[in-house]
Image (cartoon, rainbow, N blue to C red):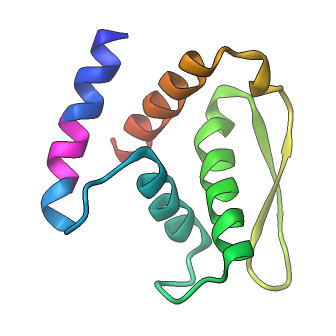
Amino acid sequence: MEDIEKKWNDLISELQPNFEDELSLKTILFLIGVQELGQGIKDFDKEEKTYLFHIAICKLLSPFGYYRFKMIDEDGWPHYEETKDMEKLPSREQKLLMKEAIISYFQ
């Protein structure tokens, strides 16, 4: 756990100089969602932003067996299916798992 927090803090320190605002888990999830969508930076509506978070979470948790890639729709949006329920994990463990997944994504 301490190792994950150290790696997390190191990652934030490495990425932060590229951004004006302080990076948070939510901000990083949004950036990963935009990256995985692959349509570049543009204005996203509220529904699209919500789906970008979902894309990021699915992509990040796929290697851990929680999601499986299904398809890309006609608009270029990826779709995943849930294969394991993450909600069964306590909130603290969910957050640690997300941090570990993000660290792996950037390595």
Camera-side residue of 43 and 69? 43
- Please tell me whether residue 12 belongs to the stretch shown in magenta: yes
Boundaries of the magenta span: 10-15
Residue at 70% across, 16% down: 89
Q: In this rendering, would 48 be left or right of 24?
A: right
Toward which corner of the image does residue 103 lie, by quadrant? top left
Please provide percent x and percent y for residue 8: 30, 32
Of the 4 image quadrants, the one containing the N terminus is: top left
Q: Is residue 29 above or below residue 40?
A: above
Magenta: main secondary structure equals helix
Camera-side residue of 93 and 81? 93
Residue at 79% across, 85% down: 75
Please provide percent x and percent y for residue 54: 69, 54
Camera-side residue of 76 and 96? 96
Of the 4 image quadrants, the one containing the C terminus is: top left
- Please tell me whether residue 21 belongs to the stretch shown in magenta: no
Toward which corner of the image does residue 73 lie, by quadrant? bottom right
Residue at 22% across, 33% down: 9
Residue at 66% across, 83% down: 45
